[in-house]
Image: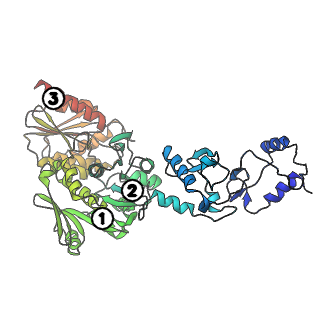
């Protein structure tokens, strides 16, 4: 003879029973609910039940409360199974647990007055994996097979973009090409986080936290991540691997001297991380004319698509001769090449390049085309996407945005390093102008020589230079950056007039007030959104008054 407590202890000695959900069965508890049920039967834990007496300890028979499970999958009546499926469909769930009460599963519910108790969106799996009685079922495999079609891995296309210059424009253009295919695109860059064309966060969002937020978003079919140095240094990447990694350029580098990254080689090691994490079936898209970038091909687990304006560059020629993928400029067209196959896109059909006159935009387009090719977008989609992308303040804010102001050309750009200045000067040289002026400041966290070099370059290309001080000096003393910029103009070959002005918007207003029809003014903005709005208002007012 044994008491109720002793009988419970015997049952709990079963090695399959444990605490909570750690094992296939849960230990029976003599808690307040059990004591109340015993009292209704005239029993206590110390009572000795009669032989054959049925003792009830719970109001339900769930595994979590000590119950057992019997697999009856092969015996369920088709009508019962159909009703369970209908219940799941009624609440819009693809995978769920359907609890029902019935005398037996061998007959339709209607015949026995049975019914549903609940439809559980997060069902337990223990009773299927390890039933107390009956055949175990591979429920995990069944769920995965239901979620993903045969041959699919549940991943979405991920493109990572890094480099010194051109990252944001390239990321935005790739995202635009994805959208042209009808995909819902999640994109992160230094302007914010965007999902399906809608901005959901603002600021510099080029780090792994923002990337993870995009990957967790339920409405994203493809992801494009601008991947900046700071985020990689802090936390690494926000993804395990990408289908395509794009490195636009390294050049002379940027942000050198910060966070122990002191040389271009250090910077390249950091930027190379995205190439090292390309899927084996994916591609690295690399600038063939930048030796440090081209060398990254050896670190790529997948294949490489090289791009360059010069198709005769040794890296391009070798890669093309080996039958690999390349993207280059041939006359007035961009050409994608693999073996004997060619695809040609006329530059006149790519507005962002202004008929191929803006060299750095041509490079951004080549990188974007290569990325879209690597992902597998149809060429018809790529063409349509390129023709519909304009680098205005909506599509690419602060990226060579061209405006008209009383017959003069105003260009707003966020360039902030010597390589960017060289690219901008080359672009401006392709645009007609009677007189050129530039409005510039400098980021205080750059090296002295990098700040000076910017105005050395601009001094050879612009007649007038207006210097202004950034809103944030980034550790510099008041006026220190302005002094470095002025030093760079000491031996300027073209600049004849230099003026220092406190405040970005005052500097912009001053430059605009001096413009004559046919002039050109390059405004290197600091506060991108605010400065663009300020310029747009002036241009709109001038247009209305004309």
The quarter of the displayed image where residue 284 is located: bottom left
Total numbered badges shown on the rendered structure: 3
Q: Secondary structure beneath disc 1?
A: helix
Percent coordinates x, y for residue 141 in the rendering: 53, 63
The residue drawn where x is 48% and y is 61% is: 145
The single residue placed furthest to the front in the displayed view is 111
Residue count near mark 3 (Cα–Cα under 10 Å), binned few <14, some 14–19, many ≥20 = few
C-beta proximity under 8 Å, tags 3 and 2: no
Percent coordinates x, y for residue 102 in the rendering: 65, 49
The residue indicated by pointer 3 is 513
The quarter of the displayed image where residue 478 is located: top left
Residue count near mark 1 (Cα–Cα under 10 Å), binned few <14, some 14–19, many ≥20 = many
Q: Earlier in the sequence, mark 3 or mark 2?
A: 2
The residue indicated by pointer 2 is 156
The residue indicated by pointer 1 is 292
Q: CA distance from mark 3 to mark 1?
A: 44 Å
Q: Earlier in the sequence, mark 3 or mark 1?
A: 1
Q: Residue 401 or 23: which is nearer the viewer?
A: 23
Q: CA distance from mark 3 to mark 2?
A: 50 Å
The residue drawn where x is 41% and y is 48% is: 214
């Amino acid at each position: 003879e044994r008491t109720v407590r002793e009988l419970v202890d015997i049952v709990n000695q079963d090695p399959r029973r444990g605490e909570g959900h750690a094992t296939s069965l849960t230990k029976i508890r003599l808690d307040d609910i059990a004591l109340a049920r015993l009292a209704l039967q005239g029993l206590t834990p110390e009572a000795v039940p009669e032989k054959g007496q049925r003792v009830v300890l719970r109001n339900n028979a769930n595994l979590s409360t000590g119950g057992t499970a019997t697999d009856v999958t092969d015996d369920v009546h088709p009508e019962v199974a159909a009703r369970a499926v209908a219940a799941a469909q009624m609440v819009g769930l693809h995978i769920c647990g359907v609890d029902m009460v019935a005398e037996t599963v061998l007959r339709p519910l209607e015949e026995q007055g049975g019914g549903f108790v609940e439809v559980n969106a997060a069902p337990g799996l223990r009773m299927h994996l390890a039933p107390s009685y009956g055949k175990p079922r591979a429920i995990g495999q069944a769920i995965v097979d239901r979620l993903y079609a045969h041959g699919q891995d549940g991943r979405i296309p991920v493109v990572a973009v890094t480099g010194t210059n051109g990252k944001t424009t390239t990321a935005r253009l790739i995202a635009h090409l994805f959208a042209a295919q009808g995909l819902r695109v999640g994109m992160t860059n230094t302007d914010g986080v965007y999902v399906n064309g809608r901005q959901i966060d603002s600021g510099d969002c080029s780090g792994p936290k923002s990337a993870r937020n995009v990957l967790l978003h339920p409405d994203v079919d493809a992801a494009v991540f601008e991947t900046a140095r700071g985020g990689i240094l802090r936390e690494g990447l926000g993804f395990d691997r990408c289908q395509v990694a794009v490195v636009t350029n390294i050049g002379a580098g940027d942000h050198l001297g910060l966070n122990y990254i002191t040389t271009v080689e250090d910077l390249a090691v950091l930027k190379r991380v995205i190439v090292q994490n390309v899927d084996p079936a994916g591609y690295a898209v690399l600038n063939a004319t930048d030796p440090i970038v081209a060398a990254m091909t050896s670190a790529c687990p997948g294949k490489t698509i090289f791009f360059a304006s010069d198709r005769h560059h040794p890296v391009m020629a070798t890669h093309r001769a080996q039958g690999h993928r390349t993207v280059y400029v041939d006359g007035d067209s961009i050409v994608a090449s693999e073996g004997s196959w060619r695809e040609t896109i006329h530059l006149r059909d790519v507005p962002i390049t202004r008929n191929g006159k803006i060299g750095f935009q041509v490079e951004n387009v080549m990188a974007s085309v290569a990325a879209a090719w690597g992902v597998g977008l149809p060429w018809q989609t790529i063409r349509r996407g390129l023709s519909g992308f304009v680098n205005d303040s909506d599509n690419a804010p602060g990226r060579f945005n061209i405006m008209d102001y009383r017959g003069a050309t105003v260009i707003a750009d966020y360039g902030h390093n010597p390589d960017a200045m060289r690219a901008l000067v080359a672009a401006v040289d392709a645009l007609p102008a009677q007189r050129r002026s530039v409005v510039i400041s400098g980021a205080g966290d750059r090296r002295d020589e990098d700040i000076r070099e910017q105005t050395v370059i601009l001094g050879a290309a612009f007649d007038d230079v207006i210097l202004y001080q950034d809103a944030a000096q980034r550790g510099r003393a008041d006026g220190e950056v302005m002094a470095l910029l002025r030093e760079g103009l000491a031996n300027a070959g073209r600049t004849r007039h230099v003026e220092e002005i406190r405040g970005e918007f005052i500097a912009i207003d001053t430059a605009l007030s001096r413009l004559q029809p046919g002039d050109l003014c390059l405004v290197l903005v600091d506060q991108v959104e605010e400065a663009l709005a300020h310029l747009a208002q002036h241009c709109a007012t001038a247009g209305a008054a004309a």
